[in-house]
Image (cartoon, rainbow, N blue to C red):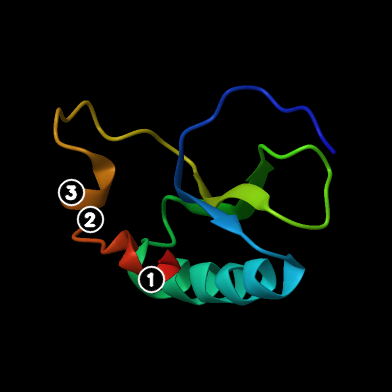
């Protein structure tokens, strides 16, 4: 577990029955981010755990930290970048 200062990131939140499903989604998120989020703004892969450190029923946000915010646009970042977050469903 790590505490960090506020930083923009692009993520999808989902619950997973166990670690097997979470690891599969983590791999997909890493590949998707590498393909669709420009390297000039993409930083580290991020996982935020909202569950109680249980091995089942994991409530996770999985995505990428961003080097800068949405450039002041009103439109959500997902729409700006033409991203389809359905890969985590």
Assess whether mark 1 and mark 2 are in contact (beta carbons under 8 angstroms): no
- Residue tagged by mark 2? 81
**Residue 81 sits in quarter:** bottom left
Does residue 15 sit above or below 72 in this rendering? below
Q: Is residue 21 left or right of residue 56?
A: left
Image coordinates of residue 79 in percent, x first then y, are 17, 50
Assess whether mark 2 and mark 3 are in contact (beta carbons under 8 angstroms): yes
Dot 1 or dot 3: first in sequence order is 3
* Cα gap from disc 2 to disc 1, whole angstroms: 15 Å
Q: Is residue 31 left or right of residue 72?
A: right
Crowd band around label 3 with a 10 angstrom C-alpha radius: few (<14), some (14–19), many (20+): few
Of helix, strand and loop, which one carries label 1? Answer: helix
From the image, which quarter does the C terminus lie in? bottom left
- Residue tagged by mark 1? 87
Work out whether residue 58 or residue 74 is closer to the camera in this orientation and state it.
Answer: 58
Crowd band around label 1 with a 10 angstrom C-alpha radius: few (<14), some (14–19), many (20+): few
- Residue tagged by mark 3? 80
Of helix, strand and loop, which one carries label 3? Answer: helix
């Amino acid at each position: 577990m790590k505490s960090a200062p506020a930083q923009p990131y692009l993520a999808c939140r989902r619950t997973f029955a166990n670690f097997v499903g979470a690891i599969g989604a983590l791999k997909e998120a890493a590949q998707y981010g590498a393909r669709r989020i420009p390297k000039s703004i993409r930083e580290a892969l991020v996982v935020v755990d909202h569950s109680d450190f249980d091995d089942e029923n994991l409530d996770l946000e999985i995505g990428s930290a961003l080097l800068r915010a949405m450039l002041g646009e009103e439109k959500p970042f997902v729409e700006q970048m033409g991203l389809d977050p359905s890969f985590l469903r």
